[in-house]
Image (spheres, rainbow, N blue to C red):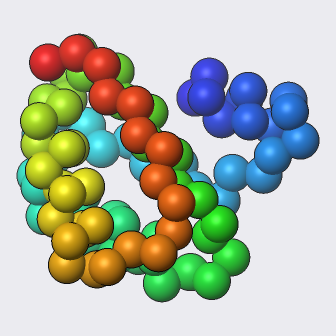
């Protein structure tokens, strides 16, 4: 949520917030990217994960799958920290 607050404080307008939770699967990450990539108003996708509960490897694999199979044209900014 702090990331959303910082974006708003600097004049941005986040379109979406997704809390994947600790049991997230690779396909769920992929599906989230599919949904976002279909929205013409989305200009960039920012992923900011601190992996305390969430396994960053699963998030990374989902992002790689989405990039590969969806042929994403939207810029991605990704920060994964933790396990």
Q: Residue at x 40, y 31 (%)?
A: 79
Check the image and report above or below for 80 versus 29.
above
Check the image and report above or below for 38 versus 76.
below
On-image quarter of the N terminus: top right
Which quadrant of the structure image shows residue 57?
top left
Residue 35 as seen in the image, left or right of residue 58: right
Which quadrant of the structure image shows residue 33?
bottom left
The one nearer the camera, 32 or 61, is: 61
Q: Residue at x 30, y 44 (%)?
A: 20
Is residue 68 in view? Answer: yes
Which percent across, then down, holds residue 31?
A: 26, 70
Check the image and report above or below for 71 versus 1.
below
On-image quarter of the C terminus: top left
Which percent across, then down, holds residue 5?
A: 72, 29
Q: Residue at x 19, y 44 (%)?
A: 60
The one nearer the camera, 83 or 64, is: 64
Which percent across, then down, holds residue 64?
A: 20, 57
Check the image and report above or below for 46 versus 10.
below
Residue 39 as seen in the image, left or right of residue 57: right
């Amino acid at each position: 949520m702090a990331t959303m607050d910082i974006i708003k404080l600097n004049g941005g307008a986040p379109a979406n917030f997704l809390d994947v939770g600790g049991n997230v699967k690779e396909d769920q990450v992929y599906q989230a990217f599919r949904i976002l990539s279909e929205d013409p108003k989305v200009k960039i996708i920012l992923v900011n994960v601190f992996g305390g509960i969430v396994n960053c490897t699963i998030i990374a694999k989902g992002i790689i799958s989405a990039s590969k199979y969806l042929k994403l044209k939207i810029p991605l900014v990704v920060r994964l920290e933790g396990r």
